[in-house]
Image (cartoon, helix red, strand yellow):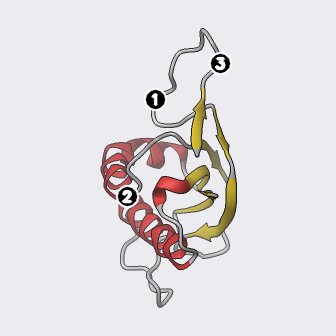
Amino acid sequence: MLQALLPEGWPRPQGYANGVSARGRSVVVAGMVGWDEHQHFHSSDFAAQARQALLNIVAVLAAGDASPSHIVRMTWYVLDRAEYRAALPAVGRAFRELIGHYDIAMTAVQVVALMEDRARLEIEVTAVVPD
């Protein structure tokens, strides 16, 4: 069972959880970038790459007999904070469609570079499948 953690008196955060409590089998997904299963980028657009990275996460979770509903932690590494913020409406639509919930402890960090030259972002995930 997964439970979002919200300390008493704190306002509910928008788009993430302050913390998550979970018990079960862990599934850890390495950083996913916005390329397809053949490691080809189809777009340099941030939102398009975010959508593809989320699709990749869903595929890896499925290979581990997990689903987006099991995600407890997500870390976004982005090259450009302004680009990330500008793409949030489209990213939010893809997130709601593919992940479906925001009770996830999330962090977003701007970084100087990523290992893949065409990548605009990288996302890593931890999921817990209940016992």
- Kindly indicate the quadrant of the structure image that contains residue 113: bottom right
The residue depicted at 65 percent of the width and 47 percent of the height is: 109
Residue 128 in percent (x, y) is at 63, 57
Kindly report which numbered mark, 3 or 1, lies closer to the viewer in this rendering: 3
Q: Is residue 40 above or below residue 52?
A: below
Mark 2 and mark 3 in contact? Answer it, CB < 8 Å. no
The residue depicted at 47 percent of the width and 78 percent of the height is: 35
Which residue occupies the foreground of this view, 108 or 9?
9
Look at the numbered disc 1 and give the secondary structure of its residue. loop
Q: Amino acid at mark 1?
A: Gln
- Kindly indicate the quadrant of the structure image that contains residue 70: bottom right
- Kindly indicate the quadrant of the structure image that contains residue 46: bottom left
Q: Which of the two discs, 3 and 1, labels the residue nearer the N terminus?
A: 3
Q: Is residue 6 visible?
A: yes
Residue 13 in percent (x, y) is at 51, 26
Residue 100 in percent (x, y) is at 37, 50
Look at the numbered disc 3 and give the secondary structure of its residue. loop
Q: Amino acid at mark 2?
A: Ala
Residue labelled with disc 3: 7
Which residue occupies the foreground of this view, 25 or 110?
25
Residue 124 in percent (x, y) is at 62, 61
Kindly report which numbered mark, 2 or 3, lies closer to the viewer in this rendering: 3
Q: Which of the two discs, 2 and 3, labels the residue nearer the N terminus?
A: 3
Residue labelled with disc 2: 47
The residue depicted at 58 percent of the width and 44 percent of the height is: 2
Q: Is residue 131 above or below residue 101?
A: below
Q: Residues within 10 Å of mark 1 (few under 14, many from 20)?
A: few
Q: Which circle marks residue 68 in the picture?
A: none
Whole-angstrom CA distance, mark 2 to mark 1, is: 19 Å
Residue labelled with disc 1: 14
